[in-house]
Image: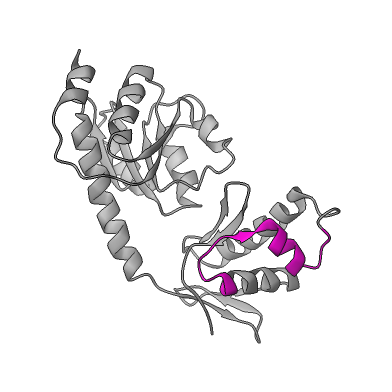
Amino acid sequence: MRVMQSLLEPSVTANLNLHVALVDDDPEYTEFLAQYLRERQARVDVFPDSNDLLAHHDPYGYNFYVLDLMLPGVDGAELIKVLRRRTDAGLLVVSGRLAPEVFRQVITAGADMYLAKPVQFEQVALAIQAVQRRIEASSAAQTVWKLDQRARQLIAPDGAKVDLSDADLSMLECFLEADGEVVSRETLRQKLGREPETETADGLNATIYRLRRRIERATPALVPLQSRSRVGYVFRAPLRTA
């Protein structure tokens, strides 16, 4: 079997050390590819349906995404667009869809690279490594978001200014103090002056959602505010005082 042969071939790829979401409805392919990546120190979660990924408790928390295009649920190209609204993680498309416009479609949607099936697992791992190197190099030179507490504004890297409510400003002050670390839900509730026993998770989520939407309306820059596995939220970009 070709899949098993590919799995047993020697590899020159280094350890990946990434948390990967593998979204593909081919159970044999995903089983062996997931095993191959795990042997290279990747954590892999497999989703046979794009809706399964989006229903996950932290769909935007992965370091890397490997997607098919022909998926049950949300179409692969649309899924790329959804992910790109919330994460700058690496995104590799591996698909058997070979129409001439497919490459342009997926790259325009936000994918980093496209591989056509059939593909060797080593090629997938090498592609992940190549994309991840570019991401890490870009992150090292990442531009800074600024919080102007006096003017009550968040300033995006492109200079766009986001007017902040009292709650927005309080939350961003937490992220400023955290300096890139995760801020717990409890810390955010305390900063907002809300009692844990009366403040529901949905209420905090709604406050975060409104801030995200305010940022999205002001700038095309990726919103760096992301959830973290039911624990809290993180501002995944340098945040400094203006």
Q: Whole-percent x and y of residue 148?
A: 59, 82
Along the line of sight, which residue is nearer the eye, 193 or 24? 193
Residue depicted at x 46% and y 67%:
237
Residue depicted at x 43% and y 42%:
80
**Is residue 226 within the magenta segment?**
no
**Residue interval drawn in magenta:** 176-195
- Specify whether 124 is left or right of 43: left
Among the 4 quarters of the image, the one containing residue 23: top left
**Is residue 188 within the magenta segment?**
yes
Q: Whole-percent x and y of residue 27?
A: 38, 19
79 up-or-down from 205: above or below? above
Among the 4 quarters of the image, the one containing residue 170: bottom right
Among the 4 quarters of the image, the one containing residue 138: bottom left
- Specify whether 126 is left or right of 89: left
Residue depicted at x 34% and y 17%:
28
Residue depicted at x 30% and y 23%:
32
Question: Which quarter of the image is occupied by the C terminus?
Answer: bottom right
Q: Whole-percent x and y of residue 1?
A: 20, 12
